Amino acid sequence: MTDLPNFSASRINLYRTCARMYRYQYVDEVPGNTHAYTVMGSALHSAIENYYLHEKNPAGTFSARFNEGVGQAMDRAQLVGTHLVSKAAVLGQEILANIKWWEIRPTDIEVGFSLPFPTKNPRVLMRGFIDMITEEEWVIDHKSTSKKPTKAALAVNPQLIIYCWAYREVRGHLPTAVYWHHLRTQEMLEAEVLVDFEDKLRNLEEELVRILEDKEYPKIERGYFCNTLCAHTDRCWPQHDYGNTLIDEGAIARLWK
Ligand code: SF4
């Protein structure tokens, strides 16, 4: 048992996007929205997992999970991009149809971890799931976003650094390579996180301390992101009348094109 607070790499990503949004979501625990394409991404992960683990038909798993996810988000009145539900359902099936299943030889799927981080003088219980580990001891992270990150961004991606650290904590050594699997194009982008790994890990540890000790959670400058992508626009900018709609769904959809 530990009394360390739970943490995850996605929290670091959110904090980098906007510290105030991090506060709303993880300190104040204000519910956010779920986009139709986020539901698609989760359903794709389930379909891939079930295929490799249980040889279940990916299309069937995807449909079941996608419909379930959409229904749950609608029940909570948190579904964003409702006009994109059909498009996301079709896109998800197209992605699955194009995966070269036989080219990946996973030994472990959806490997969960919950480990004190940093290793020395831990501050949090770092939790996460590694999508896939292969025979070659590669770590693979599946992503269904439309945009691909640059090589430089991938090399310092906090999620992938944390995965490598967790891999080493459990297996005693680092993976041999790390790949960001772009599901929409089937490209396996090698993430050079293992280059200068100890420096990157140390930087991440320092960033974690800054996040935990933040008392201000500053807002980002108001602009496109606040106005169109954040569920908390009215909390940050109450003087502006957005009517009943916090999110411009068309703007979100444009991001995914
Ligand atoms: S509205 Fe803007 S400043 Fe406020 S939480 Fe959202 S992204 Fe951050």
Image (spheres, rainbow, N blue to C red):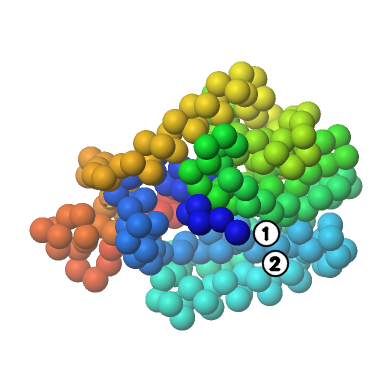
Q: Give the percent coordinates (x, y) of residue 51.
A: 82, 61
| Residue 30 in the figure: left or right of residue 203 | left
**Disc 2 residue type (three-letter):** Phe
Q: Quadrant of the N terminus?
A: bottom right
Q: In the rendered image, is residue 33 in sight?
A: yes
Mark 1, other Cα within 10 Å: few <14 / some 14–19 / many ≥20:
many
Q: Nearer the viewer, residue 67 or 215?
A: 215
Label 2–label 1 contact, CB within 8 A: yes
Q: Which numbered dot is residue 62?
A: 2
Q: In the rendered image, is residue 175 in sight?
A: no
Separation of residues labelled 2 and 1 (CA atoms): 6 Å
Residue at the spot x=88%, y=40% of the render? 135
Residue at the spot x=69%, y=54% of the render? 112
| Residue 41 in the figure: left or right of residue 25 | right
The mark nearer the N terminus, 2 or 1, is: 1
Q: Which residue is mark 1?
A: 44
The number of numbered discs placed on residues in the rendered structure image is 2
Q: Give the percent coordinates (x, y) of residue 73.
A: 48, 73
Q: Secondary structure at mark 2?
A: helix
Q: Give the percent coordinates (x, y) of residue 28.
A: 32, 61
Task: Specify the farthest residue to the left.
Answer: 239
Residue at the spot x=26%, y=45% of the render? 215
Mark 2, other Cα within 10 Å: few <14 / some 14–19 / many ≥20:
many
